[in-house]
Amino acid sequence: MVFGGSGNNCVGNTIYKYSGSTDYQTGAGIQYIASSGNIILNTIYNYNWGIAAEYGSSPYSDVGYSTGNNNLVTNCVNGMVVYQNSNCNFGTYAGVNGQDNYGWNSIYNNSTDVNVGYAYPTVQATLQAQDDYWGGGAPSSSVGSACYFYDQPWLTTAPPPPSTTQSVKGHRALSIDASAQASDPANPNKGLDVTITAQDSLSAGMDLVAQNDHLSAERLFVSYIAGHPKDPLGYVELYGSADKTNLPDITDYFSHNFSVEPTMAKILMADLYEMRGKPKLAHEINDSVIASNRNSALAVRAEMDNMLFDLYSNDDLPDAENILAKIKTQANLITPMELLDAEEAVAAKGGPAVDVSTVDQLNPNSNPEAQLPRSYGLSQNYPNPFNPSTVIIYHLPKEAHVTITIYDVLGRKVATIVDGTETAGYHEITFNGSQLSSGVYFYRMTTPAFTNVKKMLMLK
């Protein structure tokens, strides 16, 4: 499950790969890319990365259960991966006024439980993961030279497995200096005096976002940036606090602080303009990052952003394909997972590509028989990810009985969308998943002579 942009909550999913599958322990179970939101009550296993936060992401597992029961990540190559200016809170922090924010995550029996700084050890990233369970002792971890990982104290006994039936413990209100707030109540960018440590101020702001108090969180993060103008994590959290109430203000703040902000923040600002429906301007901002940081991982990140803008905002598949070709020539500057994400995004948006070797598309007067497919085929659904509908294309070289069935990740049948005799040729069917929850699903096409299965992703 891949998330981009602010305010993405991932709740109550069971995400795994079959141990006998060809892609066992590959890919990411939950992946946040320049994104924020609450990750709770998920069970993830048999992936390369269980939970990943990349490129200025700030997810958190803020729920406050009295008996624990949060995320379970096990039997992965890397339980949690955090890198490239990401700041994650998956544990209990001191808070203010005795406020409790329970982690209670179980992350164990992974080859490496935690990797902070994956592939980019000299770029800052932070993971707070106190009061989590690592199998009874310390977690196995890899931490980059410029990165931070807070794991103590840890739980010595495992909390129960995740359950969506647990009641949520109420949050106490954040206490701030009222006199500072009253000094200029009309100015949302006025700094607030918050009597907590620097790291706790970021965590407290994340808690305000979890309570949907985005304006207070924005003020807190702006105050933090004022005191720490070179710390990219302040900009990451400010970006993550954006919603419809403060998106213009936060975008304007970013646009007027280029003199002090780290370059990574420019890419986040491009995403903010994208969210405001200005993809052309977003593209131009990324182009400026690429021009001033050539042959760097940062430039490749900006290229990937532009590729996604072309795919999903500009509907410019040829340009996206050109960018992908360029990214492939710089594969040494990105991880294999990032390259796979880029390739899958372009392939999914490409939709029902027709093999011209099997169809005479150039001669409208050709024999109709020559335009029939020479083989059976099942195309990747498009769009993918989808919400709520997606189109599935399939083709038959001759008349046949066709069944197309949808399954969830547990192998349970969700729907049968085709079941009958179809003529030779190209066919398409629209599947409406409005009744489904977010997650991975599979669709299988079966004929007497052909069977194929593909994966699709529903994101609400």
Image (cartoon, rainbow, N blue to C red):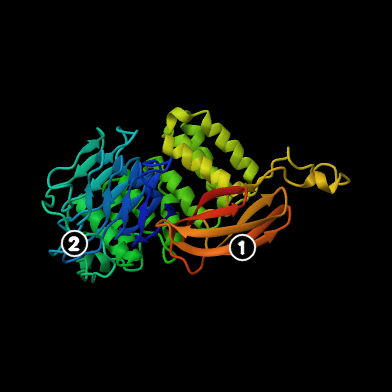
With 342 as the anchor, is 367 left or right in this view? Answer: right
With 84 as the anchor, is 142 left or right in this view? Answer: left
Q: What residue do we see at 30% from left, 41% from top?
A: 78
Task: Determine if residue 231 is in view.
Answer: no
Amino acid type shown at disc 1? Asp
Q: Residues within 10 Å of mark 2 (few under 14, many from 20)?
A: many
Residue 125 versus residue 376: which sits nearer the camera?
Answer: 376
Q: Which residue is mark 2?
A: 68
Q: Where in the figure is residue 304, as x and y percent of width and height?
A: 50, 41
With 136 as the anchor, is 61 left or right in this view? Answer: right
Q: Residues within 10 Å of mark 1 (few under 14, many from 20)?
A: some
Q: What residue do we see at 18% from left, 45% from top?
A: 150
User: Outermost residue, right direction?
Assistant: 365
Report the mark closest to the observer, 1 or 2.
1
Task: Determine if residue 59 is in view.
Answer: yes
Q: Where in the figure is residue 403, as x and y percent of width and height?
A: 59, 58
Question: Which mark is first along the chain, 2 or 1?
Answer: 2
Total residue callouts: 2
Q: Of the numbered discs in the image, which one, if any, rests on residue 419?
A: 1
